[in-house]
Image: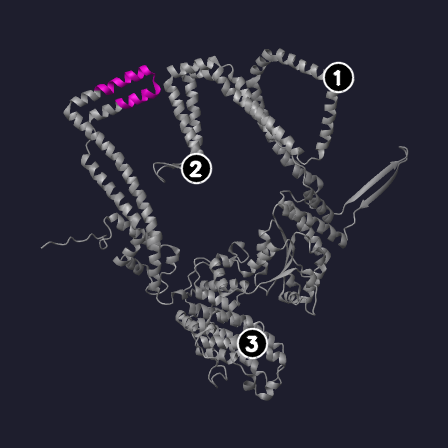
Amino acid sequence: MPRHRRAAPWQIGDLFAHEREAAAYEAAVDACLAEPAVARRLGKRPQATAENVRAHMLSEANVRRALEPCREHHLRFRAALEQYQAARTRVDYLHDPPAPATIALALLSLVFLVALVTAPWTGVAVAAVPPVVLGAVVRTHPLWRMRVHNNVGELVLRAALFVRQRQAEHADRRWRRDLQVNGVRPLMRRVVEALLGDDHDSLLLPDSYEGLRSPRSRQYVVGNEASRRLARKVAQLRGGTIAVSGPRGAGKSTLLETCAAEADFSVMVQAPATYSPYEFLLSLYIRVCETYLKDEGHEVPEFARLSAFRRALLHVVPAARRVTRHLLFAASAGALVVLGLAATARSMEDRYEDTVRERAEEVWSHLTGTLEGIWGGERAGAALAVTLTGVLIWRLRRWPGTDELLRNVRLLTGGVGGVALVLVAPVSLFLDTDIRRNARVLVTESSGALGVLLLVSLLTLSLAALKGQDVGLWPGSGFLVTDRVLKAAMGLLLVVVAVLLHRTPALYALAADDDNAFRVACVLLGVLMARAGAWNAPQPEPRLVRECRDQLYRLQTVQTTSAAVTAGPPQLLSAYTSSLSTVPPNMPELVADFRELLADIAQERFARDGRVVIAVDEVDRLGSDAQALEFLGEIKAILGVPGVHYLISVAEDVGASFVRRGLPHRGVTDSSLDDIVHVQPCTLAESVELLQRRAPGLSEPYSLLAHALSGGLPRDLMRYGLRIMEIEDKTRFVELTDISRQMILEELSETMAGFRTLLGKHEWTPETSATLLSFRSLMGHLRYLCPCPSAELQKALQHVAFYDLEEQLGTDAAANVPEATRLLIDEASAYVLFSLTLLDVFGRPDFARRREAARRHGPDGDPEMLAQARQELELSPYSARPLITAVRTAWGVASRPAAGTVTTIPVPRRSPCALHAQPV
């Protein structure tokens, strides 16, 4: 009966054919276990341990699932590995120590190759004789022939083995990467989630929350409907004033910053708390001028703090240092070039001086004769041509393309002349008989030296072409061509040239030709002409830059001019002095100048398809809506500049005033604003997206909790998100029930402390003071915060949440409570009911199941309703309470406790919880 072969220890089913495959899979499992996203989840619940995850990942079913997505790379790796092992077996079988004949034949062949490169043809012929003779002898001897054949075969197989090994390693790396990314990692996440059990999303395991720690950072900004509406309005308007209205914390400032950052030219200013229209406009004017100078690459002038001598010194010293450095190098280089070309210049002068002088005299004589003929009236045609040329030159002074035409002429003349002079050198090499003769001698007598020079030159050119690339048989097997490698190759080329010049007379004769200095001079002169033709003179300062600088001097300095006249004989002098001081511009003049400058900037940027944005933030910080409207009325004079978009953040009251335009009510917004964008609180989807951007990996239940507490306001949303991380850092809680209860109770404690302070400012009687005692008892229960469910705390919260003055104080005593006090009590009661609802929703286990049940109940079970209830609390406790009651019903929570169960508040505990005794 046949026996089944026992599987290898590393084998899992029949999935692996080699031990190396199993090792690669285990390495991928270990790498994924060490990843932060997985490591944070291990140990959070009893079954979710590294040992259990590893055991599940090594089961046959999971291994098969992990290998399936990367099957193609797996098969390629297996084939490459088998080819490598087959080649390795063949090499081991043919292994034989090197024979003496093999060593001798290899050395003689190496000598022949060296002679082939460096020696003349006669030396090559002599060096070829020993290997040929030895090869013939080996061929006639059977034993030697067999051993040399085996050695050569082994050498070839070892070269093939090296290639197979590299191919197997490359396939191994590709399969490991594919296996880890597409196979093991997704499967391990599912295994970890299964081991964590039901409701695994209730664990707080974010990847990072750096975005919550940087609320003003623009890299975490998420677009919403308000930003898209504002972008559309700005794109539709050629210019105008757009107000951004919304509650505090809705993201108006971020919206303005984002729109301003996308503009071609933008200035963002903050509205002053106590404003003066003149000072605000002066500050805005200065900011516009400074921003324009910086955008155009010019320095903003500095005033005061430094003396005139010190400021001049700060500008002169760097310039002097740069000039000195350039002069030092220019003097050294010029001296060497002049010294090297002096003899060539003198020989050229001796050879061509007479010819050049004669030709110049002929040209001068012809020119002076023509001018004399025109002056004497003998050449009427030439005189007419000269006159028309003068008129044309005068007309060209206003032609816009004159500067461009002159620049093109200079560029064409210098470029053509420079290129012609540079080409003179290589062309003259083919016409020089000495050069051609020495070249023939170099080819015939020193071919080895020429071959070495060409080989090193080709190597340098190849490295220059491959700079920044990986050189090898396949990616990752060679070396990176860096600047250091290229410089080493160039150094090698210079060394080879120096050695060959010293050892090769023909090459030295080519380099030391008498006309080479003239050729070098032509190349240098051609390069100088080309650079001179391409040189552009410094352009004059643009008009708007000059105007902005002048306005800065005008607005930030007091300019005084003095003049003195001295008269009388030297013995008796008399002086008369007068001074002139500029007067600061008044408000109408300042407004006119600002509008003119801003219109010019807008026109310039519009020609570039740009946009000018002036953003005024924090207008709602001025106090009441009347003050904000008054501010808009004061600055209305600078609004409405053509091509300029003004973006102004205002409070909801000002936005409501603009919406009522056209009705019997009219206000300053009718004439100040062109349109308005209302920024609403974030929806649930927008809040989840914002928190995912700023805290990747934050599970959805925590986003719902932060959204409900904040009411969708982005500022509060990020604050509550950071508060969640803070609680986790302090308490090490990771479950939703613990973190939510701790967070909600902390927020409730702080809020109720504020309510109790406000209630203390009202008048109370012995009959009505029981209300204050109820709030005091609730604060006692909130003194020792603990995530453990507490029946006493639950009753205390229910007592205040469903507080009834008539029931608690009696009808007569309740009638004596002032209306303002009653409203404050109702607000506090409604907020406690909201917090109690959050505790019932998030502070109980099995959140996912209860959420699904609430969703099936109807619209009131949508978590968005919690945020809407929080928003409604800011308007009225009476309209918020029905919303909260509907949410409680949808989530299966009692809308109101049974009668008589919350008539009194239980006595608060006097010590912390035994399980959570550490204060947090």
Of helix, strand and loop, which one carries label 1? helix
Give the crowd class for mark 3: few <14, some 14-19, many >=20 residues within 10 Å: few
Along the viewing direction, whichever of 564 and 164 lies nearer the viewer = 164
Q: What segment carries the magenta color?
A: 108-133
Q: Amino acid at mark 2?
A: Gly
* Magenta-drawn stretch contains 131: yes
Residue 127 coordinates in the image, percent (x, y): 28, 18
Residue 518 coordinates in the image, percent (x, y): 54, 17
Of helix, strand and loop, which one carries label 3? helix
Q: Could you tell me which residue is drawn at 35 percent across and 59 percent down?
A: 189
The residue carrying mark 2 is 468
Q: Earlier in the sequence, mark 1 or mark 2?
A: 1
- Number of labels in the image equals 3
Residue 915 appears in the rendering? no
Q: Nearer the viewer, mark 2 or mark 3?
A: 3
Residue lying furthest front in this view? 381
Residue 373 tag number? 1
Q: Nearer the viewer, mark 1 or mark 3?
A: 1
Residue 430 coordinates in the image, percent (x, y): 47, 17
Residue lying furthest left in this view? 1
Of helix, strand and loop, which one carries label 2? loop
- Tell me the distance, in whole angstroms, between the alpha carbons under discs 2 and 3: 69 Å
Q: Earlier in the sequence, mark 2 or mark 3?
A: 2
Give the crowd class for mark 2: few <14, some 14-19, many >=20 residues within 10 Å: few
Give the crowd class for mark 1: few <14, some 14-19, many >=20 residues within 10 Å: some
Please tell me whether residue 203 is drawn above or below residue 825 in the rendered image.
Answer: above
The residue carrying mark 3 is 879
Residue 305 tag number? none
Q: Quadrant of the N terminus?
A: bottom left
